[in-house]
Every structure is written in C-alpha cells, then in structure tokens.
Amino acid sequence: MSLSALRRLIIPILLLLTAILLLDVVAELRSDYLQFFSWLPYVTLCAVFVLCLYYNQARLFTAALALLVSYYLIRTELQVALTVPHAVLIYSMLSIALPVTLLLLMLLPARGLRNLYGALLAAIVPLQLAVGLWLIYYFSATTTALFINTYMPVKPVSGYVLSITGSACFCIAFLAGVVLLIKRNSEDMAALLAVLLFCFVTLAFFKQMGISTIMFSAAGISLIISLLRNSYDMVYRDDLTGLLGRRALNERLKGLAGNYVIAMMDVDHFKKINDIYGHDIGDEVLNMVGKHIAAVQGGGTAYRYGGEEFCIVFAGKNIQQCKPLLEEIRLKLSNYNMALRDNKQRQLPKIKAEQRRGRRASNRDGETVSVTISIGVAEQDKLHNRSEDVLKAADSALYKAKKNGRNCLVCY
C-alpha cells in the first residue's frame, strides 16, 4: 500500500483543469459549431468501447456505457429548467446512479469483458435505466418531483446544483475509491475515480453552458489514456512484482548514453525457499524483494530481469555514487524478516493449494523467513561502451558475488 498510486490521477486532474478552462471558450462558440461539438462525447466514448473490447476491460466498458446513457439523457431530457418535474426526476436519478455505479465497479473484481461476468456487469446500466423509466411512468412525475424537492432538493446553495444527498454519494464513492486506489495501485481504479470527478463537476455546476459536453468528452479521453497506459503495463510490467519487466529493460538499454551504472541482483538460495515452503511463498518473497528494490534512491530504475533476478539502471551515475544506494537495499533486506501468513488466511484451502501450487504441507503459523541478495555492479567505460557489454559485466560481477559467499556486492 503506497501513496505513490495517487500519481495515476495526475493526468485526469490535468484534463479536468483543462476542461474547466475550456468552458468559457465553448460558451462563445457559434451555434452551428456548438452543435457539431456536442457529438464529441459520443465519438470518444465509442472509441472507449472499441478499446475495451480489444483489451477485454469490463469495468471501463460499463463506466463508458454509463457515461453514454447519462450524456444522452442530458442532451435529450435535461435541456430544460430543473423546475420541470420529469427533468428534476432524471437529474436526481443520475446524481445517485452515477456514483453508486462507479463505486460498485471499483469494488467488483476485473474478470474480463468477453464472458458471462462481463455481460452481467455491463447489464447494470440498462437495468438501472429500466428501473428509472419504470419510476417515471409508474409514478406521477409531479408527485415524485415534489418528493425530491422536499427530501433532496437541488440547488442547495447559489451556483451549486447537486443536492446534499447526491453530493454525499459522490463524496463517499470518491473517498472509497481513493482508499482502493492506494491499496491496489490499479490503472482501472484511477480511471474510474477520474470518471467520478468528471461526473461530479458536470452535475454540481450543471447550469454552466456546455459543461456536459466538455466534461464527458474529457472523461472519454481520460478513459482512452487509461486503457493505453494499461496496455503499456501489460506489455512492459511484471505481473507479480509490479516492476518494469525484461522487455522494458531491453528498450531502456537501447537508449542509454553517457555515464551509467547497471546493477544485477539475485535472491540467494531461492530454489531452497521454493523447495521448503512452496512456490506460493516463493512468489511472496519475490514480491517483497521487488518492493525493496523499487524503493532505490538516486534516480535508479528497477526491473525484474527474470526468475529471481532483478536489475537496476542508474543513468548519469558512476559506481562510487551507486554503491551506498545498493548496499542500503542489501542491508535492509538482510535485516528484514518476512512473516509467513497463517494457512487459514489463504484464499485457497490447503489441499487445493498443494495441488495447484505444489507447496509443501507444514505448519507455518508465526514462522518467518529471512532473505538476502547478491549484487554485481558495472559501469559504462572505454572497455564496456555498449549497454550489452555493461550488462554482461554486471552479470559477471554477480557471479563472483555468489562465489564469494553471497549476500555481498561486487563491482566489476
């Protein structure tokens, strides 16, 4: 759990600020341009649908569908004063349905779109629409509007349209989403939080001319960016540790120039850990080591090279500058005792876990495991001018660290 996950919100917040600045520009557009501009949310959201189908993203597909239906209702039903009974009813339903739907999408797991689960998830939006239409046609719009104006009145303060109840729903959904984002550090979670922000601004300042067009277009663009960033993570990030993977390292090596240092690291006796505790504990060890390595200072970038091997690249540094940074990681790991989880806390029953992961049956309650790493370091110089040569030199130094007894650092 790390606050660094909040950095995923930087681009959506910049988009939100840009959209707010564009409101005055849109208000001055000629009516024919404004009519053309009003189709932009449909275009961006349709692009989101295509990308979601391609990348198999059910939650973002459902969020885009909720935006599309909401924007259509705004354009067709809410271009009148909110004193009109059916308008205030639809507006109030949107103010509750949008935050509740987005919060539900944040809480539900991601299991893909092209399956029954994805279809049921996407069905949330038409189901809500059907319930809303039933309420409109079954009950008198005037009676319902009177109820809304009594218990959740819109325009509670001057310039602010969203009711207190609707504001509370958005606030609860946002706070819960921030906690989930910090906990999971997921690009999907950041995207859903961004959509929540765009919807809130739209409904809170609903009287502003063109606000739904601007905000829903920005929401669609935010979802597109999120899907592209998510695809980058799938290609270049390691699923287990969250570090950049071998492919990302290879791309980085192609662009290295000037002075730089490459450090290769290997978990000592990792095979023994797997043999004694099983592969599930082995994965936990790799994840823990990855987190320690990712915290490297001095501008180093951490990568999972493969298996139990990791790599750090320091651009613009020499070995003398990097040694204390790497030693700090080695010492922290050697002094860290990782507590093994209680068998009862595991998601899978013990028998199934043994069958699926090949782990050894043992009582590990309260047991800890200590892990050390060996490090080999090399820098760019006249003899090692190419990045491939520096990497080989670092690997050679790592081999020497292993021969020297492990849990040490060797410079080439």
Image (cartoon, helix red, strand yellow):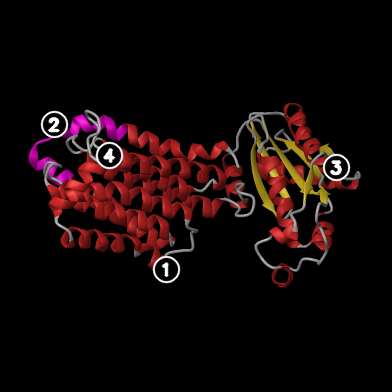
The span from disc 3 to disc 1 (Cα, nearest Å) is 47 Å
Residues 92 and 376: in front is: 92
Disc 3 on helix, strand or loop? loop
The span from disc 2 to disc 1 (Cα, nearest Å) is 43 Å
Tag 3 residue: 407
Residues 168 and 221: in front is: 168
The picture places residue 249, in percent across and down from the top left corner, at: 61, 46
Question: Which mark is in front, 4 or 1?
Answer: 4
Q: Quadrant of residue 11?
A: top left
| Mark 4 crowd level (few <14, some 14–19, many ≥20, 10 Å Cα) | many
Tag 1 residue: 114
Q: Report the amino acid beneath label 1.
A: Arg
User: From the viewer's perspective, is 1 left or right of 137?
Assistant: right
Q: Which mark is residue 28?
A: 2
Residue under the point 65% across and 35% down: 300
Looking at the rendering, the stretch of residues picked out in magenta corresponds to 18-38
The picture places residue 73, in percent across and down from the top left corner, at: 19, 52
The span from disc 2 to disc 4 (Cα, nearest Å) is 29 Å
